[in-house]
Image: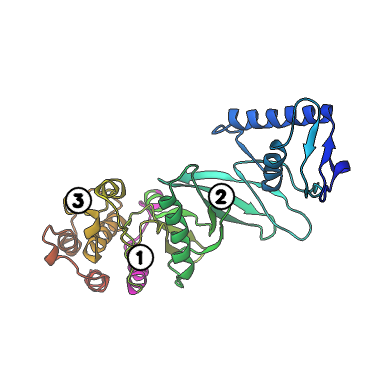
Amino acid sequence: MNDRLPTGENTAHFWAENSRNLIFAIDCIRRLERGLKDTEYDFSIESYYDNLIKEVNQFLSGSGGSEIPTNMGKIELYYEIPLFMPKDSIQIESIYCTPTISVKFIGEGSYAKVFKYKDPFYKTNFVIKRAKDNLELKELERLKREFEYMKEFKSPYIVEVYNYDENKKEYYIEYMDSTLYNYINENNNKLEVMKRKGIVRQILKAFQYIHSKKICHRDISPTNILVKEYDDVDVIKIADFGLIKIPNSQMTSVWTEFKGYFNDPSLVIDGFHTYGIIHETYALTRVIAFVMTGKTNLNNIKDGKLKSLISKGLSSDKGNRFQTVDELLDAFNEL
């Protein structure tokens, strides 16, 4: 086709046999694309070639040749860029080449999948949070909003994010070694009390910072609190800010957004739109209990001061709870 291009102000003829061959090739590609969707062989077509296929499909004819329209430029052939990319992969831009890097699926939430990959230049791991297919506009906006807020945070206790890809609806995140939930479960038999207290203080300092920005996280749990393990210290960082701020939602959204053992059960009746600081301190109290005991079951807690703190933080009387994280931290420091 490049022999006929560019067309300029006049059309050009593309031979019948070549037209049929190209139609057949495109049909094979599209059938493979549909047939392999949501399998381990799922792939996407590089955006330039995908747009090109859509363009030529508008004028290709199976008989008598095809009329190439006016003002069509020559087709660029990028030999170093693959046409077909596995869905579980990314392309790393480089001044030398654009290698395709395999990524490993490590988890998912209600509207995004999470992948891990090793950057060939930095020789270290990163994470990609990628929107699921066929999300509603509201959910895509939530993913981008989450990135924008996290990008603005300047705290050692918040997971760092690096870049949002508008076309792929994904963003890049620093790699963390573990969730708090897994970390406690794996180390519960050897964690000393002082180490547990240090973890709790980091968590509370993180939420002091978050609340100083007039923001509620609204999805506090040991799976959204992550751990970076160094040789000399373990650092706690908060992730998953997809539910920050209160959306103008109908009651149906309340039921889908209220989730998790660590949230205040009164929200089921009161409605998620009532969520405030006292619900954050409720969830944080549960997190404290989990870190200090290694259990989610609150029965048989022997430490009287810890038991008293938990009782106050989880009180059904919201006026009796810790009204701020500062109050909760002060009480915790008395243990």
Q: Residues within 10 Å of mark 1 (few under 14, many from 20)?
A: many
Q: Earlier in the sequence, mark 3 or mark 2?
A: 2
The kind of residue tagged 3 is Pro
Q: Is residue 119 left or right of residue 96?
A: left
The numbered disc on residue 203 is 1
The numbered disc on residue 265 is 3
Q: CA distance from mark 3 to mark 2?
A: 34 Å
Q: Is residue 37 left or right of residue 181?
A: right
Position of residue 270 measured from the top left corner of the image (x, y, whole percent): 17, 54
Q: CA distance from mark 1 to mark 3?
A: 22 Å
Disc 2, SS: strand
Position of residue 287 measured from the top left corner of the image (x, y, whole percent): 29, 57
Disc 1, SS: helix
Q: Earlier in the sequence, mark 2 or mark 1?
A: 2
Position of residue 258 measured from the top left corner of the image (x, y, whole percent): 28, 50
| Magenta part of the chain | 186-212
Q: Residue at x 17, y 50 (%)?
A: 300
Examine the structure image and report whether residue 1 is included in the region drawn in magenta.
no
Q: Is residue 86 left or right of residue 7?
A: left
Q: Is residue 156 visible?
A: yes
The kind of residue tagged 1 is Ile
Q: Nearer the viewer, mark 1 or mark 3?
A: 3
Q: Residues within 10 Å of mark 3 (few under 14, many from 20)?
A: some
Position of residue 37 measured from the top left corner of the image (x, y, whole percent): 57, 33
The kind of residue tagged 2 is Lys
Disc 3, SS: loop
Q: Is residue 233 visible?
A: no
